[in-house]
Image (cartoon, grey):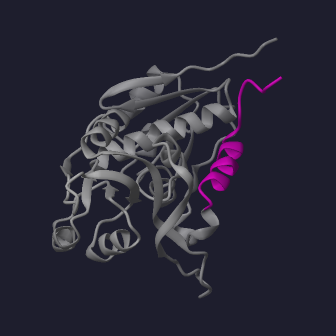
Amino acid sequence: MNNQWCSLNELADFLKNEFSIDRYDHSEQGGIYHPSDRPVTRLGLALEPWPDLPEWIADHQIDALWIHRPWKLDTIRIPQDIGILSHHLPFDETLTMGYNPLLASLMSKLGQPEPLGFKQATADNGKLLPERPIGMLFDIVGQEFDALLREVNSLFGGYDRAEAGRCPTGAHTISRIAVVGAMNEGLIREAYERNADLYLTGQYRKPAQPAVDDTGIAVISIGHLRSEEWGLRALADLLHDRWPTVEIVMPISGQTVTVMSTNNSA
């Protein structure tokens, strides 16, 4: 029988593994922001604080809170027995635009994603930490740009900008996708040189336009908030798979969404 609740420490350990936080400098790893021994039967997820967050916590009977950007969080207004977790960069790089195998699977990848670009942090002792891919490349069954754009629109609930690019045959068939957590000339050219037909990213960056024009690669920018909200839903699914009896509550586009518990009492 599954436990009907989990602890804040169990949540922290699970996310430590899912986010592979050993790749990050200690200051970027995240984890427990405010400790608590309170059992967690209802977990709140949020991207950042807002003025009515304390009331939202009370109204939804939240036992613990995970928050992406905690810097403006007024912990004085939150009950002291509410445990708080936070992950910023590890969440962005794992569950939004970047090396995100879950997203690749939902986009019907063929084979394993390949890393695209790397960044590497240095620990306090000067030791280089493991490399972290900035993005991924994967193949799909070829489809027209417009069909793929509809798929992306459905998956993310919209997009900010789409450029079909140009193709020597004029067919605009997409069969290889780069999903990247940044947009600059170097990454655009690397994706193109590795045969990507489409560059999928969060925020469109104008300084990369010369590389887009030169290569003719197609580009879709989802938008920063859409990619984060997609990641928040993905995080809820991961946590629900691990603790199906824990209820998860989160604000998405101004509306509270609840992932109901599966209460296995038999």
- Is 115 drawn above or below residue 48 in the view shown? below
Instruction: State the extent of the magenta-drawn residues as a range.
Output: 1-20
| Residue at 33% from the left image edge and 59% from the top image edge | 197
Residue 151: x %, y % from top left: 34, 37
- Is 79 drawn above or below residue 170 in the view shown? above
| Residue at 67% from the left image edge and 54% from the top image edge | 17
Residue 65: x %, y % from top left: 52, 38
Quarter containing the N terminus: top right
Residue 100 is inside the magenta segment: no
User: Residue 255 or 193: which is nearer the viewer?
Assistant: 193
Residue 3 is inside the magenta segment: yes
Quarter containing the C terminus: top right
Quadrant of the rendered image containing residue 210? bottom left
Quadrant of the rendered image containing residue 131? bottom right
Residue 82: x %, y % from top left: 57, 36
- Is 203 drawn above or below residue 234 in the view shown? below
